Image (spheres, rainbow, N blue to C red):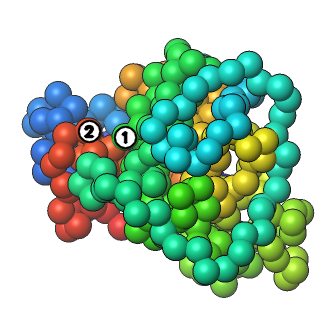
């Protein structure tokens, strides 16, 4: 997530975007109100605008979010806001083995129920904590789909904890296209090799997690492995700096924070549109990341 992929050349040309195979899935232009491939032009022009010298990113804000302590069953149905009592403890919780995935009804287009609840829970909290961002749950679902296929198809228990910890590849340069990132937080990465890796269903680098860590299920802990915590933290990260997800340019800019790749942006936006509309993009229409 974020900084583990080598950044491309910053100049973004319309031709390079159009050249991405299947940049815009079938039905996406209709869903977003664009026609004749105008979404491609919109994404290209808005990214060029956002990364011009006059529109560089300002200092990032750090709104805090918290939920009241409650039984997991209650959290699956409704998130209630309370005044935060303090920052959460940042750590990865050691859970016992033998846990099973939550048996909940699937959400739109088959999103696992536990993941749907986590995305919608984050939307509700952010609507209170940062209403100007207007974060839709479907955008968080798009990120979750691309990063971990919703915790590997919903393999998380009723608390939102994966039945097995989720880790990305070790960032030691052995994988083509990835940066070499030294490990400064073995506690979260679980590594002792000197190199780090992304963690949890939303694939945060440990350093980024500590900066934006949020408690999405009200237990006082911000665990990157937990679906509720990871989803809310992803929302905070995307919204930071005063960005508004209703603006396509600002939304593109936010997604590029996760992965500095226009193919990645196209995939996330396609899945966001799909979850909002019920129209599934064909695999062949999604550019390879």
Tag 2 secondary structure: helix
Most foreground residue, 81 or 260: 81
Q: Name the residue under label 2.
A: 276
Assess disc 2: are there few (<14), some (14-19) or many (≥20) residues with their C-alpha within 10 Å of its C-alpha.
Answer: some
Kindly tell me whether residue 265 is visible in this rendering.
no
* Residue 268 % position (x, y): 38, 50
Most foreground residue, 202 or 218: 218
* Residue 36 % position (x, y): 10, 36
Q: In which quarter of the image is the N terminus?
A: bottom right
Kindly tell me whether residue 187 is visible in this rendering.
yes
Q: Mark 1 points at which residue?
A: 138
**Is 173 displayed left or right of 30 in the figure?**
right
Q: Is residue 121 above or below residue 241?
A: below
Tag 1 secondary structure: helix
Q: How many labels does the image show?
A: 2
Question: Answer yes or no: do the residues labelled 2 and 1 have beta carbons within 8 Å?
Answer: yes
Q: Which residue lies furthest to the top in this view?
A: 132
Most foreground residue, 181 or 228: 228
Q: In this view, does 205 lie above or below 180?
A: above
* Residue 81 % position (x, y): 62, 23
């Amino acid at each position: 997530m974020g900084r583990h992929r080598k950044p491309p050349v910053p100049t973004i040309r319309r031709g390079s975007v159009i050249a991405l195979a299947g940049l815009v899935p079938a039905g996406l232009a209709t869903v977003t109100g664009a026609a004749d491939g105008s979404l491609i032009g919109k994404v290209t022009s808005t990214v060029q605008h956002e990364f011009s010298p006059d529109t560089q990113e300002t200092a990032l804000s750090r709104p805090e979010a918290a939920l009241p302590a409650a039984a997991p069953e209650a959290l699956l149905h409704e998130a209630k806001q309370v005044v935060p009592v303090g920052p959460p403890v940042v750590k990865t919780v050691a859970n016992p083995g033998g846990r099973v995935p939550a048996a909940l009804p699937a959400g739109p287009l088959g999103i696992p129920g536990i993941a749907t609840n986590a995305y919608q829970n984050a939307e509700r909290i952010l609507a209170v904590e940062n209403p100007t961002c207007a974060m839709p749950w479907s955008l968080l679902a798009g990120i979750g789909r691309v990063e971990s296929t919703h915790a590997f198809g919903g393999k998380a228990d009723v608390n939102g904890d994966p039945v097995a910890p989720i880790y990305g590849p070790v960032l030691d340069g052995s994988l083509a296209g990835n940066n070499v990132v030294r490990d400064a937080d073995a506690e979260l990465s679980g590594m002792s090799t000197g190199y780090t890796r992304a963690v949890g269903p939303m694939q945060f680098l440990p350093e980024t997690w500590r900066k934006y860590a949020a408690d999405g299920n009200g237990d006082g802990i911000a665990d990157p492995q937990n679906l509720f915590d990871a989803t809310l933290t992803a929302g905070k990260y995307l919204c930071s700096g005063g960005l508004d997800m209703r603006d396509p340019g600002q939304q593109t800019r936010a997604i590029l924070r996760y992965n500095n790749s226009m193919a990645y942006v196209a995939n996330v936006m396609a899945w966001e549109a799909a979850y909002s509309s019920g129209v599934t993009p064909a695999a062949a229409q999604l550019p390879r990341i």
